């Protein structure tokens, strides 16, 4: 990881969505999907974002892809606000920041060969000759493990397995010339046995080519396997973040502790008792711009009355490990 200037930064980002109001009987309200999200991404690192369904992981990626604009705060690439780029800066950003989707079946066009998917962005973003393009396409296919490259490149998406399609899509990301890859659960639709191959490939691209990854996942074990740092999200809030080994081996926020205790661990003996607090409100935390306090308090086994009033500022609990919790 090259830690001078961050390649991509998120500063105090909040995202509000208007929800409801589809018919005259339902009231329109505002959901705060992300609240005060702040992090940096450096060249050649993988930053994992974990948290349960609906906590805002994909919203971070979609905002980085400019599908949404922040209600507050900003995202910057090479120091420039990505939502205020000029035409040529936008073309550069679209080339350098690419997203890999969860579903490898719908991310490739069934009417075109894999070569077509790789060659098209090359024509758009690079001035290679036809011979250079063929050489590059074969190089990228080999890099992602689709060999023999010529045979695989001539195939259509339906002739590839899910894992192979995800590899082909990553080859496409390389042919665009991306430096940052926003990978939104890239292995969750794949068979467990082929997930590791995709994760190893992400590691190779990071080490060999210095690519940076935002790796979105539910799976804390794979987050530890591929990432350098991790952010734990709860209801759109960063509750714990820092060095991946520290956060996973010695979690300090009650939600991270719960998440890790709930993860499958074949070496753990006996039954795990999860300290889950259940009351009527505890299942889903719906955050609005007016909500206050700690978002996790309704499910927190150690919540105090103060937690309803205040969501404390970030506290450093060890070197490169931070939490937002009044405990510790
Ligand atoms: N365009 C939208 N309009 C309204 N609400 C939205 C929109 N997009 C997302 N949301 C809401 O924002 C919250 C965060 O959604 P998001 O898709 O980011 O969750 P996630 O962490 O990626 O979940 P999953 O793990 O299930 O993919 C959810 O409550 C979702 O319903
Ligand atoms: Mg998602």
Image: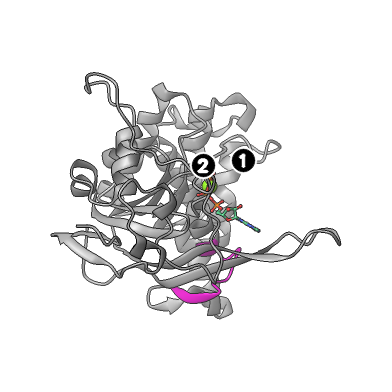
207 over 29 or under it: above or below? above
Mark 1 = which residue? Answer: 108
Q: Secondary structure at mark 1?
A: loop
* Left or right position of 240 against 144: left
Mark 2 = which residue? Answer: 169
Comes first in the chain, label 1 or label 2: 1
Q: Residue at image x 25%, y 47%?
A: 207
Tell me the crowding category of disc 1: few under 14, some 14 to 19, or many 20 or more residues within 10 angstroms, Cα based.
many
Instruction: Locate residue 317: give its quadrant.
Output: bottom left
- From where the camera sits, is residue 138 visible? yes
Looking at the picture, how far across and down is residue 147, in whole percent? 43, 28
Question: Which residue is more in the foreground, 241 or 132?
Answer: 241
Q: Is residue 244 found inside the magenta-colored segment of the image?
A: no
Mark 1 touches mark 2? (CB < 8 Å) = yes
Looking at the picture, how far across and down is residue 252, in whole percent? 23, 51
* Left or right position of 218 against 208: right
Instruction: Locate residue 200: give its quadrant.
Output: top left
How far is mark 1 from mark 2, CA to CA?
A: 7 Å
Magenta extent: 63-75
Looking at the picture, how far across and down is residue 5, in whole percent? 26, 72
Give the residue furthest to the left.
319
Q: Residue at image x 50%, y 36%?
A: 166
Question: Which residue is more in the foreground, 98 or 33?
Answer: 33
């Amino acid at each position: 990881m090259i830690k001078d200037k961050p390649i991509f930064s998120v500063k105090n980002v909040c995202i509000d969505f208007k929800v409801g109001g589809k018919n005259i009987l339902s009231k329109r309200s505002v959901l705060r999907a992300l609240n005060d999200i702040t992090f940096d991404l450096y060249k050649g690192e993988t930053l994992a974002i974990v948290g349960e369904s609906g906590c805002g992981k994909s919203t971070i990626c979609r905002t980085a892809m400019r599908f949404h604009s922040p209600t507050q705060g900003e995202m910057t690439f090479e120091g420039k606000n990505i939502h205020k780029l000029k035409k040529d800066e936008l073309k550069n950003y679209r080339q350098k920041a690419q997203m890999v989707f969860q579903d490898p079946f719908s991310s490739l066009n069934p009417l075109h060969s894999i070569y077509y998917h790789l060659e098209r962005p090359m024509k758009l973003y690079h001035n290679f000759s036809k011979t250079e393009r063929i050489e590059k396409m074969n190089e990228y296919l080999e890099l992602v493990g689709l060999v023999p490259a010529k045979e695989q490149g001539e195939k259509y998406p339906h002739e590839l397995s899910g894992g192979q399609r995800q590899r082909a899509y990553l080859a496409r990301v390389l042919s665009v010339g991306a430096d940052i890859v926003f990978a939104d659960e890239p292995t969750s639709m794949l068979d467990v046995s082929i997930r590791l191959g995709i994760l190893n490939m992400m590691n190779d691209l990071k080490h060999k080519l210095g690519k940076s990854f935002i790796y979105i996942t539910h799976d804390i074990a794979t987050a530890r396997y591929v990432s350098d740092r991790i952010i734990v999200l709860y209801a759109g809030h960063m509750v714990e973040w820092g060095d991946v080994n520290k956060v996973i081996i010695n979690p300090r926020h009650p939600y991270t502790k719960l998440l890790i205790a709930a993860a499958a661990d074949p070496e753990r003996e006996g039954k795990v008792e999860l300290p889950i607090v259940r009351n009527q409100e505890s299942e889903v935390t719906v955050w609005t711009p007016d909500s206050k306090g700690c978002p996790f308090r309704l499910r927190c086994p150690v919540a105090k009355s103060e937690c309803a009033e205040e969501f404390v500022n970030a506290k450093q609990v060890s070197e490169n490990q931070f939490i937002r919790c009044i405990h510790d």
